[in-house]
Amino acid sequence: MSREGSPDPPRPKTPRKAVALHYGGKTAPRITASGAGPVADRILEIAREHDVPVHDDPLLTAALAQVPVGDEIPENVYVAVAEILAFIYFLNGRVPNSDPSAIDPSATDPRPSPRTRTDRDRP
């Protein structure tokens, strides 16, 4: 309320923002589309048409909207984006990449696992 006791004037509504990402699994995700208002509405419409998962996070969207289209996401949002991507992979029953070490670090560990027999184990 204002000092005179009258209600504050309504604040203009900020336009909806949307940012689209592409993640190929080898490098950081890239911004593939970004916009506000009608452009954001179109980005979301295209995502729905193609069954692309949509995550609503205004703070993350605001941060990513500052990144130019075509650029990789900045390091300060890696964790937030990684959590979203991991959840999407989980929903789809997928694993982020086919590298066995991503699933089982011992797959590329040169040390023998406790279950592996070595020549030293032989009598």
Image (spheres, rainbow, N blue to C red):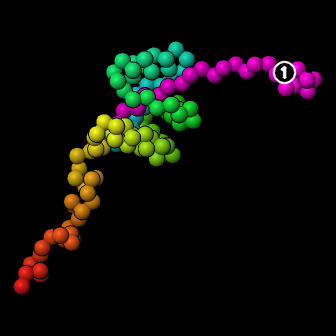
Tag count: 1
Q: Residue at x 88, y 20 (%)?
A: 6
Name the residue at the right extreme: 4
- Looking at the rendered structure, the secondary structure element under dot 1 is loop
Q: Report x, y in % for residue 31.
A: 42, 31
**Magenta segment range?**
1-24
- Which picture quadrant has residue 54? top left
Q: Does the segment drawn in magenta span residue 4?
A: yes
- Residue placed under numbered mark 1 in the picture: 7
For the C terminus, give its image quadrant.
bottom left
As drawn, 93 above or below 100? above
Residue 114 among magenta residues: no
The percent coordinates of residue 27 (x first, y second) are 34, 42
Farthest residue, direction bottom: 123
Specify the quadrant of the image occupied by residue 3: top right
Report the quarter where the N terminus lies: top right
12 left or right of 72 in image = right
Report the side of 80 relative to 97 (left or right): right
Callout 1 environment at 10 Å: few (<14), some (14 to 19), or many (20+)? few
Image x and y of residue 116, in percent: 15, 70
Residue 69, visible in the rendered structure: no
In the image shown, does 55 or 32 lie closer to the viewer? 55
